[in-house]
Image (tube, coloured by chain):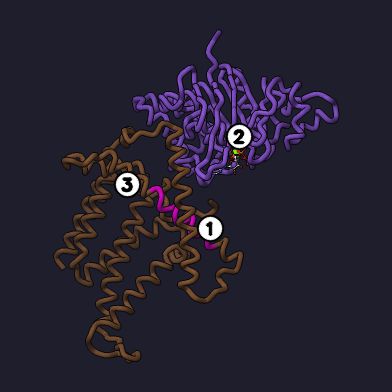
Amino acid sequence: MKLPILETINLGHRFANGRWGLKHIDLRIDEGQFVVIAGANGSGKTTLLRHFNGLLLPTSGRVLVDGIEVSKDLLRARKIVQMVFQDTESQIVGETVRDEVAFGPENLGLPRDKIKALVDKTLEQTGLKSLSDTSPHLLSGGEKRRLTIAGVLAMKPRVVVLDEPFSNLDYPGVKMVLEQLLCLHRRKMTIVLCTHELEKVVAYAQRLVVLSKGEIVADGQPDKVIGSVERYGIHPPCSLKCKGCLEPWLS
Amino acid sequence: MAELSIFTYRPRPVWIVDCDPRIKLAALAGLSICSLGAGWTALALVTVVTSILWLRLVPSLRVLWNQTKYFIFLLALVVLARGLLTPGQVLLELGPLDLTAEGLAGGGYIAWRLLVIVWWSIILTATTAAAQIRSAVAWFLRPVPLVNEKVVATMIGLLVRFIPVILQQVRETMAAQQARAVAASSNPFRRAFKLILPVVRRVFLSADRLVWAMEARCFTPDRPFYHLDRGPADWLLASGAVVLCAALLLS
Ligand SMILES: Nc1ncnc2c1ncn2[C@@H]1O[C@H](COP(=O)(O)OP(=O)(O)OP(=O)(O)O)[C@@H](O)[C@H]1O
Ligand SMILES: [Mg+2]
């Protein structure tokens, strides 16, 4: 059997103040899957995602990326797993759009002309080409989100982990990000997305994991799991209530 | 971030933006040192030249005033303190202290010099990307033994990048406090104290997030340096700086 690209074994995380943020998390995510992790505010979504690229390390249990423990080789884990933060403002480190996208590849030590080609291609792909010399702080919310995604894609990761990628976006913004994700998914990238608004993505996902109070309370095919989400403080998609099935959000 | 400070780098249509950062740094250092013993006429000449550069950088004098008014207030305090503490021809008696002409002149001279140096530093940070400053610093430090120029350069680059963040935090915290009528308290020390704690807290938090953002994209101090090369604008800047330095030294 093929190794899962992401795996957590009995993962537990306790914060410095003694509070447990995660308890007994067992997850196996295969390469190429589109997984949605849902949970109410404070259920531990962000905490869980941060374990996948070693921004947090387990208090108990283990986290494996492509078969190797994250804590044994942080750099390797971060090359494979890239993360789009919940708060775009705090993810942007570059002074111009172009710098921001180049930041990751520069850290990987690629040659200069290769970085340039990679950055150009990524800017093109995310529709940010015309903004390359703008200061990121002058971009709109949707453009900033696209920029953080571009910064992550330029790293050529195998897994992209997104924390609430639709928050603060208007309809065209959501549409653009969602289309980008679907395109990545078609190209066999593994996508793990956290959200409390299932409406927009759940119809595209192959798997839905529900977190509540730091524990996994449901895990399976979206149409099987979706019926139980309301009890964990997540609003079920309207299409489920009206038509009894999950409808794609993009029409 | 709605309003960007003039201190922040962004590509601007001014020739000095394209200059080699090493020459800019050297010019700043040279001018600052040479202005230490300069006479009034040379200082006036330098001020005129600097103001011309300034007018190209700032959209309007009001913006300039708004963003530097606290600093100018500080300088006014310097002048007043010198005026009260230096013996000489008495202009005004204020209780136990006398305001003297010599004191005011001395204070005015110090304040003027400080103002010009600060103007130059702002011109440098406003027209030079942090990556460029980092590369220039590393270039100057390379021959120095026992100093890891890459680490020092990274630290300086981060510092430069962080100045606008800190200013932004101050402005936001002030706005939040004004909205809750903290400004109503008329004691300026009390107000400053109430401002400092939240600002320091926020600055530390954003530093933390910045570290995470950088780590998530595999940050290493071994990043490639900005490509440094010299063009015609550099000769203009270098010769201009040399002429001004000579004027300052000779006066
Ligand atoms: N550094 C910390 N110290 C102590 N407790 C923390 C810390 N960070 C998070 N928590 C707590 O852990 C719980 C899970 O937080 P987490 O940020 O993972 O939630 P989330 O599911 O991402 O929520 P949201 O939807 O609001 O983003 C929350 O109750 C939070 O208060
Ligand atoms: Mg969260």
| Residue A45 numbered mark, or none | 2
* Up/down of B83 relative to B62, above or below: below
| Residue A20 numbered mark, or none | none
Spatial separation of the CA atoms under disc 2 and disc 1: 29 Å
Is residue A150 visible in the rendered image? The answer is: no
Q: How many marks?
A: 3
Q: Is the magenta stretch mostly helix, strand or loop?
A: helix
- When asked about the image quadrant of residue A222, the answer is top right
Spatial separation of the CA atoms under disc 2 and disc 3: 35 Å
Chain hosting mark 3: B
Q: In which quarter of the image is ligand 2?
A: top right
Q: Do labels 1 and 3 share a chain?
A: yes
The residue that appears at 45% across and 19% down in the rendered structure is A68
The residue that appears at 60% across and 34% down in the rendered structure is A45
- The answer to whether marks 2 and 1 mark residues whose Cβ atoms lie closer than 8 Å is no
Q: Which of marks 2 and 1 is in front?
A: 2
Q: In this view, does B142 lie to the left or right of B111?
A: left
Q: Determine if the C-beta at disc 2 is less than 8 A from ligand 1.
A: yes
Q: Nearer the viewer, residue A25 or A135?
A: A25
Amino acid at the residue labelled 2: Lys
* Up/down of A137 relative to B168, above or below: above
Q: Determine if the C-beta at disc 3 is less than 8 A from ligand 1.
A: no
Q: Is residue A53 left or right of residue A223?
A: left
Q: In the rendered image, which residue does mark 1 sit on? A: B172
- For mark 1, give the secondary structure: helix
**B66 is within the stretch colored magenta:** no
* Up/down of A185 relative to B104, above or below: above
- For mark 3, give the secondary structure: helix
Chain hosting mark 2: A
* Chain B drawing hue: brown
Amino acid at the residue labelled 1: Glu
Q: Residues within 10 Å of mark 1 (few under 14, many from 20)?
A: some
